[in-house]
Amino acid sequence: MYKAAGLSDRFQMDPQMRLPRRPRFSEDYLLIDLGEAGLLVQGAEQPELFRGKAARVLLPRLLPLLDGTRTVEDLHAALPQVKPALIADTISLLFLRGLLEEGPTAEDQRLFSDEECARYQQQLLFFGRYTDVSRASHNRYGTQGRLKLTNLLLIVEGAAGPSIAAELAKAGIGQLSILPATADQLVLYKEIAALNPFCSVQVLDPALMLEQEVGRYSSVVVVGHGDDPERWGRLAHACRQQGVSWLRAIYQSQRVEIGPIFSADEGACYQCFLSQVPAAECSQPAATLATEASAAYIALTIVMEISRLFPTALINKVRRFDLDSFTLDEQPILRLPRCSACGSATQAQETLRLPDDLALLFHLETNHKWEAVALKGHQIHYSAQVSNLTMGAYKEYWTFPKVALPPLEELPPVAADLGAVLAGWRPTAPERITVEHLSQICGLSARWREPGTLPYRFTPSGGGLCSAELYVIGWDVAGLDPGIYHYDGARHRLERLREGDQRPYLRNLIAVEELIDRSAMAIVQTGHFYRLSSKYGPRAYRYVHLDAGVMTQSLRLLANALGLRAWNLGQFADGGLAELLHIPPLQELPTQVVLIGC
């Protein structure tokens, strides 16, 4: 559930959530009045139900005005009896739910004539309903414009070729070059150019030296009855050398196999692909119906990928569509670290080595792929799930004894100059570390900045989810009994997990045990992997360690500013330390140990 109240104020502080200048609500949506239950919008990515008084009273008056010709100021003037803040919040909520696009702009009018708009009328209506799914384009014309500005090379064999080319031409591909497999197929493509006067069609000679030509095109699609490793391998090399992405598609009697998209500088290459998926053997479809179904599916996929109407689904992925059962399955394709074409290997026979390559393989697979980035992905920060994660971003041990820390407001401020501390300056060291020092180190790094509000703390973290938890192992801190404590940043207090001097256990767990004798306490950081993975998926493991690095810097700077010494250690026995802290495996993991002494 999403609430409109206050949403426009939050958007104003977020440069990635800019509302349309002239918002347009698609005329192709179906509105269903459910009375007291609200207003239902059908026809978007998913049904949207709006509830509340504004849904019953304001939306029926506001939606007809959202035709792409009025600014927000014009809407205020048209509805003078409605508070401007309510209109702004309502528009913000519609935008958040993917129901608004930008109205026609001057650039759109220069790009498309009235005749073109009339030809693509139904397609533009469809694009208008879904443009905001990926937010790759500002409106329906931007989506259609991606097709118009595409210079596509279609390399195709078999009976499905003319149907695929015809659908692409009718969809509005600006420049379409067709390369048939053999000269006797040239006649099949003669009538394609007549299908759309706004599409430039060229049929190429099959004897063309393909490797020298791919650089002229913005995209390449290869369609066949099966893989041709030798020919397609040369094409893949040429595309990679000339910075052109290409898409692989196979159609056979029972299935269509499409993908992956081979990017020029991201993701797996064709050689990586062949080492994971056996090359599809040639098998021509016998039935005309199967051929037409295959052609329609391939053409639709090409249009969706080029237009970016939906987030791309074929980067490092193969999709198989069974024509008999109408079922769909996908297989991920890994970029192999030792691939001689796109990896680090210099010899073709080098392959993946496990477990040696696991870390690099993980990084390659979790790197952001530019071609797969969806601008709308940013608004996950506004989802109810993430809001709940943020509000619950601090761990608490409910049944363990609580130990109060001196309030930060009652302690002298840490007045050291940051630049001087970074340069190595430290004030005079105190004779002994006290609980007041501990309060300042933990509080100024991991406490809520304003207790009782959203859990924003002094040290930033990925998505504001505060993945770094602090555990204090103290043995010589004045005012604190020896033991293991968890720091509760929401309430600025400690929770005692174990009593007694833990140094005998700690000596067996860290790599530089002589530092223990020079320290009074250890602050063990853990990363709450489960909390981050709920939002970021596999990339959470990377963010856990980034958060740990930032928190380590905060702890060391604060310790040095108080005249203390701090040593951070990354070499320790993970399992033993996790067992000592009693943290749940796979959900939370030790990331850093910071030893602090005088």
Image: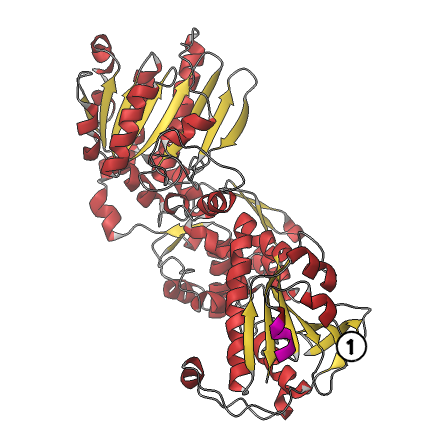
Give the answer, above or below, for where 141 lies relative to 159: below
Q: Is residue 368 visible?
A: yes
Q: Is residue 6 magenta?
A: no
> Crowding at label 1, few (<14), some or many (≥20) Cα neighbours within 10 Å?
some
Taking the image as shown, residue 331 lies to the left or right of residue 224, namely: right
Taking the image as shown, residue 519 lies to the left or right of residue 230, namely: right
Q: Which residue is mark 1?
A: 402
Q: Nearer the viewer, residue 419 or 186?
A: 419
The residue range painted magenta reads 514-518
Q: Secondary structure at mark 1?
A: strand
- The three-letter code of the residue at mark 1 reads Lys
Locate residue 326, reporting x and y percent.
Answer: 54, 21
Give the answer, above or below, for where 354 lies relative to 290: below
Q: Nearer the viewer, residue 540 or 159?
A: 540
Q: Which quadrant of the figure has residue 219?
A: top left
Q: Which quadrant of the figure has residue 581?
A: bottom right
Give the answer, above or below, for where 429 lies relative to 31: below
Q: Nearer the viewer, residue 87 or 469?
A: 469
Q: Main secondary structure of the magenta part?
A: helix
- Count the numbered circles shown: 1
Taking the image as shown, residue 353 lies to the left or right of residue 522, namely: left
Q: Is residue 1 visible?
A: no
Locate residue 222, reporting x and y percent.
Answer: 32, 24
Q: Residue at x 81, y 71 (%)?
A: 400
Q: Nearer the viewer, residue 360 or 567?
A: 567
Q: State the residue lying farthest toward the front.
A: 514
Locate residue 113, reporting x and y percent.
Answer: 21, 40
Locate residue 288, reporting x and y percent.
Answer: 41, 9
Q: Residue at x 47, y 57 (%)?
A: 62
Q: Could you tell me which quadrant the N terminus lies in?
A: bottom right
